[in-house]
Image (cartoon, rainbow, N blue to C red):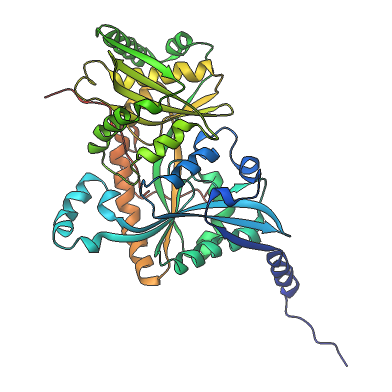
Amino acid sequence: MDQPTEPPGTPRVRDRHREEDRHRVEVLRSVEELPAGLWERLAPADDPMWSRGVFTALERSRIGPEGYAYLVLRRAGEPVAVLPLCLFRDLMLDRVVGPRERRLLAPVRRLAPRLLRVPMLFCGNLLGQGHVLAAGPRGAPAARLLVAAVLEFARRERLGTVVFKDFAAADLAPLRAALTAAGFFLVPSLPDTELGLDAASFEEYLAALPAKPRRNARAKLRRFAARPGLRIDVLDEFGHLLPQLLALYRQVMERADQTLDVLDHAFLAAVADGEGLRRRLVVCFEGDRAVGFLLCLFAGAGATGARIGLDYRLAHEAALYHNLHYAAVRLALADGCRHIRFAQTAYVPKVELGCALVEQWYAMTHVRPLPRAVLRRVLPPALTAALAEALGPHGPANPHPMTPHPTDPHPNRREERPPRAPR
């Protein structure tokens, strides 16, 4: 009697299931619950926003999310990847849209604010570029299991909208097939800004700028120097300044287009304590009073100007915004950094500083089919238009929905603006 034969492709399916059976995902509720040394082994070595101390500070604060979680992917029992999650149970939609959309939503907020509450799960880093932390290639079975675990977690926590936030194309590529199969779609996010540091000194950096940015930089340096009583210091210890720093930071946030995350005293206090962090504060004083600051974080050969605060009473006349950034460039050069990032804001002055724009993407979906179809239809053109508006002269001349390259794979945040001249 002939032996029964298996349908074509069965061995490959069986091998795939066998490989997936070797993986499992567990959910941890704090970065402190991760196995010892795992975070340090997997996190990007040159990205300060992925320092363990940043996530510890997030968990100690109340800057937006109602909770945090970490999906740990294990292969044959060994942890091989980590994906951080941020849980927003009542995210107000008008906090993460642009000014035009916020004006349109104003009557809704006034008459029926609950309609603007969106339960949402963010995957990646709330304050920085998104990554799945992994030591090496993960493979298709691991990607499928990780994406399925994200959606299962979202359903269990009743968080309908799921967003892989601010991922570079290369970081989305290993997940691309699994995300597409699960109903995710890609939307362009606001780019990050990165300044390469290959100069030997600040003067060499200035000399390498194009003629107009170089003249503008020297003029702003002179404008600051001409203001009596102003000085810029770099501090290792700044806990005693937190009330002043928060007041300056609030001035910036009051002018912000989006407020997805607003740092609070607990977050800044945890950063000031310095646990697991290399951090320094660039601060401008008028006499003994702080009138501007830029919080700088360091890891490996990378630095980040993480958050800024400004006293708008004198910010324009003294060119505070630019001079704080110049001081951060000096500091990063002195620390031997090869690059410094300045976040997703104020693109015109940052391009003038010499920053390159780092392309980033959202991968988005909803756990239910009808809202997913609405998101897929509405969000790509709306966010692409918002991206073009944010980039200004550095965006496309004729904005249209962007399609990722086939081999590559925005709640957006636009926190700080350089001060404007008084009218």
Image quarter (top left, top right, bottom left or bottom right) of the C terminus: top left
Image quarter (top left, top right, bottom left or bottom right) of the N terminus: bottom right
Q: Position of residue 148 (x, y in %)?
A: 55, 65
* Numbered disc total: 0
Residue at horizontal 54%, vertical 61%?
A: 147
Direction from residue 281 to residue 388 in the image, left or right? left
Q: Position of residue 335 (x, y in %)?
A: 54, 19
> Looking at the image, can residue 129 be seen?
no
Q: Position of residue 221 (x, y in %)?
A: 32, 11
Name the one closer to the observer, 306 or 412: 306
Residue at horizontal 33%, vertical 18%?
A: 284
Residue with the most extreme bottom position: 1
Q: Identify whether 28 is placed above or below 214.
A: below
Name the one closer to the observer, 212 or 88: 88
> Looking at the image, can residue 188 be seen?
yes
Direction from residue 386 to residue 48 in the image, left or right? right
Q: Locate residue 315: give its quadrant.
A: top left
Residue with the most extreme left position: 423
Q: Position of residue 343 (x, y in %)?
A: 40, 34
Residue with the most extreme right position: 1
Direction from residue 38 to residue 101 in the image, left or right? left
Q: Identify whether 329 is placed above or below 373.
A: above
Direction from residue 96 to residue 41 in the image, left or right? right
Q: Locate residue 353: give its quadrant.
A: top left
